Amino acid sequence: MNLKTFLAAVRLYWKTFLVVTGTVLALGLTWLLLTPTRYVSTTQLLVSIQGSTTASAYQNDDVVAGRVNSYIALLTSDVVSQRVIDKLGLSLTAAELAAEVSATNVPPKTSVIDVAVTDESPEQARRLAETLAREFVSYTDALETPTGEDGQKVHTTVVTAASEPHSRLGERLVLWLLVALTALLLGAVAVWIRSLTDPVVRTAERAAVAGGVPVIGCVMSAATASAGDLEAYRRLRTRLRATTGTGGVRVLEIASADGDVDVTVVASNLGRAMGLAGSRSIVLDAGLPESGVAEPAPEPERGKDAVNTNGDDESGQTEDNGNDWPEPEHRPGGFPDTLSVSAWAVEPDLIATRAARLVGRLRSDYEQLIIAAPPVLSTITASVLSDYADAVLLVISAGTTRRRDLSRAAEILNSTGSPLIGVVLIGQVSDYTGISQQNGAHALRSGQ
């Protein structure tokens, strides 16, 4: 996940990011506020050799360097800490006091040792630093013995008295910064986990993964009031032509995965966009009736030679030749013609006997036939109708359709050999794979 992808994911899951980041930040700041301010007092010790001669100067430097390293370890040892505790009558353990003491050789390779003592009380920090320096000098003087015939002796001296205690403001600022960075990091992790486990399709990237086909458009599902509202559908029209070759698609089936999108409106808007490009279009509405009760299937009108109500002539052959279906409904305002065959949604068997002739007739009368099919997961009608389509589009509602439903719908269509070419997203989409919003509708940057 790069920075662009992460920022887009944060915009999409901003509530998750704010909740996690805010919670961690609040807990961290509460901990910092409840933690008492600590003060530090410093002192300096000098390690030297008494009675040295010029001839042994280089040897003495090596001795001092070794002593400095040893003294740094002794300053934080339990034995020295216990001498300070006994001197001041503290209720601490030697290990607890040693944890508050730090000793360093600053600058390096010198005989000067910086000692710092930390405590919640500024006065106590200073007392500890003074006492530690005195007790350490006394302790090392007792340890050291002459190192040579010339009476050399390593000696430790306090060169800087305990300083005025000061709070560790820099350390506290670093802690505040670490808390903030930790909150942001955990918020980012929460967004990443949410994006991986979100059961709902919210982005074009997730739709492409779940459907196994590319997202070729993003439009709004409301009926367009004017030609200016069709910008996203124009882009979808262009994308379809680019995807299916120079010949384009003569018969296009549009189906939703689970019925959360009104595909009839989408088909009508797309047909209108195609009409603006000079293609005479018709929408074959095979969707489920809103009432849940199928309307009667459109019966072929009997020719003048028909002799009985069953449509059979005297030889027993059906007179329906595909040219006697009811006339499509002509809609004003540039909308495509429509023909309702909603009975097919609940009686898929009708498709086998009637769809081939009807689609054949409409192919000859129109440049573009758009089939608005019922939901794939509700009936097999969409799969059956795909046999008569040049291409199939799955339309899903961004932020509503579940990934598993999209995957199942795509699997069902692919298992029947349907020419599924892509997914179209409906709704407001925050995405990072090429979706942008223009003129109130979303569209693909590619295929403009």
Image (spheres, rainbow, N blue to C red):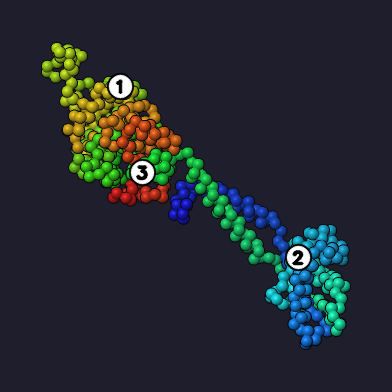
Q: Are marks 3 and 1 in contact (CB under 8 Å)?
A: no
Q: CA distance from mark 2 to mark 1?
A: 88 Å
- The answer to whether residue 314 is left or right of residue 160 is left
User: Horizontal and vertical percent for residue 268?
Assistant: 27, 36
| Residue underneath mark 2 | 101
Q: Position of residue 312 (x, y in %)?
A: 18, 14
Q: Amino acid at mark 1?
A: Asp
Q: Position of residue 264 (x, y in %)?
A: 30, 33
Tell me the element at label 1: helix
Compared to residue 199, the image places residue 49 above or below, namely: below
Q: Residue at x 35, y 46 (%)?
A: 442
- Classed neighbour count for the residue bearing mark 2: other residues with Cα under 10 Å, few (<14), some (14–19), many (≥20): many
Q: Nearer the viewer, residue 285 or 107?
A: 107
Quadrant of the image occupied by residue 247 = top left
Q: Amino acid at mark 2?
A: Val
Residue under label 3, please give it: 214
Q: How many marks?
A: 3
Q: Which residue is mark 1?
A: 349
| For residue 272, side relative to residue 79 (left or right) | left
Question: Closer to the camera: disc 2 or disc 3?
Answer: 3
* Callouts 2 and 1 close, C-beta under 8 Å: no
Q: Is residue 101 above or below residue 337?
A: below
* Residue 434 appears in the rendering: yes
Check the image and name the residue furthest to the left.
304
The percent coordinates of residue 398 (x first, y second) are: 40, 41
User: For the residues marked 2 and 3, what is the alpha-carbon distance in whole angstroms?
Assistant: 64 Å
- Label pair 2/3, CB-CB below 8 angstroms: no
Query: Which of pointers 2 and 1 indicates the residue nearer the eye?
Result: 1
